[in-house]
Amino acid sequence: MVTQLTRRPSSALPLIRKQKTHVPALLIRWSLIFSILLVLSSAASLAFGSRMVGMDGLVDGLFNPSVETYEANIVRKRIARTVFALLCGAALGVSGALMQSVTRNPIADPSILGVNTGASLFIVSGIAYFNISSAASYMWFALAGAIITAVFVFGIGSLGKNGATPLKLVLAGAATSAALSSLVTAVMIPRSHVMDQFRFWQVGSVGSGSWDNIVLFSPFLLFGIIIAVICSAALNAMALGDEAAKGLGVRTGLIRLVSSLGAVILCGAATALAGPIGFIGLLSTHLVRLILGPDLRMVIPGAALLGGVILTASDVIGRILGSPGELEVGVVTAFVGAPLLIALAIRSKVGSL
Amino acid sequence: MTHDTITLIKVGRRKRQRRWLIVTGLLTIMTLALSMMMLMLGNTIHPVGEVIRALFGESIEGVSFTVTTLRLPRMLAAILVGFAFGIAGDVFQTMLRNPLANPNVLGVTTGASMAAVFCIVILGANNSVISTASIIGGLATVIVMYVLSRGKSFSIGKLILIGIGIQAMLNAAISYMMLISAEQDIPSVLRWLNGSLNGVTMSAIPPIAIAVAILVPLILLFSRSLSMLELGEQMATTLGVRTDLTRVILILGSVAMISIATSITGPIAFISFLAGPIAKRLAGPGFSSLLPAGLVGIVLVLASDLVGQFAFATRYPVGVITGIIGAPYLIYLLIRMNQKGEL
């Protein structure tokens, strides 16, 4: 063994060294690009809307608190919404990355698996039967609904010989979603005030972004991201298959449980405050994986950044297209994300997806 | 083949035929009974005699208006739409040889819905425009699905995934149009999510009646070829079926019928999914399940609408009831298919 190592042909050495330096360079370049995108989308989110703000107003609003022009005030009002969009996007991105690696399945996203509808049902029932109206109670109901639905959908989807294949999971998600949305309608119809309150939540919008919501949301985001970071190395090993991961000393059951919990908490919390926004997890994870490769230690931060960028940019697009009102961001992300789902379905044989 | 086997086959065939006839007969009787109930029940309950007299044009004070103007269109719509959904769903399921492959899952109804909502909310169009637009919407969805799922490796799974993707987009568009629609439209908005018979007027009946009258005979005519297609493409060709022609006619016919039905009541959840399997279970093998499926569709719509109207303190639209019945069955079916390893 030792002799074999020392006898390695000399031509292989530079190749290995080159690969080692290859990764950080790529990482630096792309984190730079992501940061620029982040700044650009945030600036756009502050400047565009039913009333455009110029460069001066933008700078005044952000950096000169003494200036009290109309435009500067508009910018200040938009800060909370922008931060909220970035955080929600990050949460949904990481949630998608975790779900995809736990289920080892490229078509996993909270909206496709029906987790969002579970959160919806619990929130509607909460409004109707328990008179909840504060954002914090929305949060707890949504989390409970998301967790129960996720357990149910994964349970059905992983029955049978081959475990959880994409098709099975998606179908289980769609069927559960259909059942739950019938129940949502049934709860809603006798109560017109619930219907009115819920109608706007249901489309998915970051318009509800306020500092209170951000404060409420941050602990969950932090908790979820910490879980994701801790689990990422173990999940990398699990990508090789459960047997190999166990051989490397990974407690697969525990990791799977903890990271699913993290994924559900992230998407449940985001859904509670912003409504069901689909496809962010799917989009950001696939883009990041395309750029940075499959290593989860890079995919997770990348998905967080890119998720924030995509959600914020979609929100800006929605505001521009829907001007003078707005096109809710959930509508925009569906139109961007669904074609990706279709492309994934077309490109690969579903059995081996 | 000996004489005995031939008699055995004949006896078996007669048995199956008798079963088919009995089931179809019973379903027809149920349809008639439920339709009568639709006309009799309501805020005031009218006796059978008065209802029948009102139907034949006699004007009875307090009865004629409720029966002929309010309840009759509702009943007719329920029957026609249920029949259309049932038959078209069975065509899809039989042709693609998979109970999951129904117009709901594949997004046809969502396409028709989206076109109808667009006409109502954005254009404020009249009935004939809405019907035409929803046919175009339904057909366009099918064509897009066909183009996308074509290629070397066709599979039902791929078709379903693409359908779910297309539905996500269409649903997003529908919910956006609902948001910008006027406040007083909110109740009618729900129709386009789940389907409802509320507020159907006599003027909505002719398009679906014409469609059913033309398309159902056409589909039944081709149903023999359909049952041979069930044996597989090659087998059907060997038996002399023109497979492509059969497919095109059946698909176009069912899609047109479903689209018009959707433009009137919205996509009543799961009827096109439930009717086929129930009819097959009831009527047994050997004879076409199309007609029983259509009748099961009618019975489901009528019964669910009666339950939705009168069983609870509030009146629920029919689609909510069928959704609550249908979705658990879909989940059950998935569990069964997963355990058998068919997915």
Image (spheres, coloured by chain):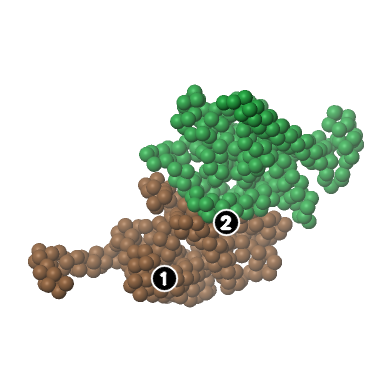
Residue A232 position in % (x across, y down): 37, 70
Helix or strand or loop: what does disc 2 sit on?
A: helix
Name the residue carrying label 2: A176
Q: Is residue B311 above or below residue B242?
A: below
Q: What color does chain A have in the rendering?
A: brown
**Residue type, label 1:** Thr
Comparing B260 with B123, the one in front is B260
Name the residue carrying label 1: A252
Residue B333 position in % (x across, y down): 58, 51
Comparing A220 with A106, the one in front is A106
> Can residue B105 be spotted in the picture?
yes
Comparing A155 with B214, the one in front is A155
Question: Who comes first in sequence, dot 1 or dot 2?
Answer: 2
Q: Mark 1 falls within which chain?
A: A
Q: Is residue B9 above or below residue B96?
A: above
**For this view, does B274 lie left or right of residue B59?**
left
> Can residue A318 be spotted in the picture?
no
Q: Which residue is drawn at 49% across and 73% down?
A: A220
Q: In this view, does A282 lie above or below B306?
A: below
Q: From mark 1 to mark 2, how far is it between C-alphas?
A: 27 Å
Helix or strand or loop: what does disc 1 sit on?
A: helix
Within 10 Å of disc 2 (Cα), the crowding (few <14, some 14-19, many 20+) is many
- Tell me the quarter of the picture where residue A301 sits: bottom left
Residue A64 position in % (x across, y down): 39, 73
Q: What color does chain B have in the rendering?
A: green
Comparing B209 with B15, the one in front is B15
Q: Residue at x 70, y 43 (%)?
A: B300
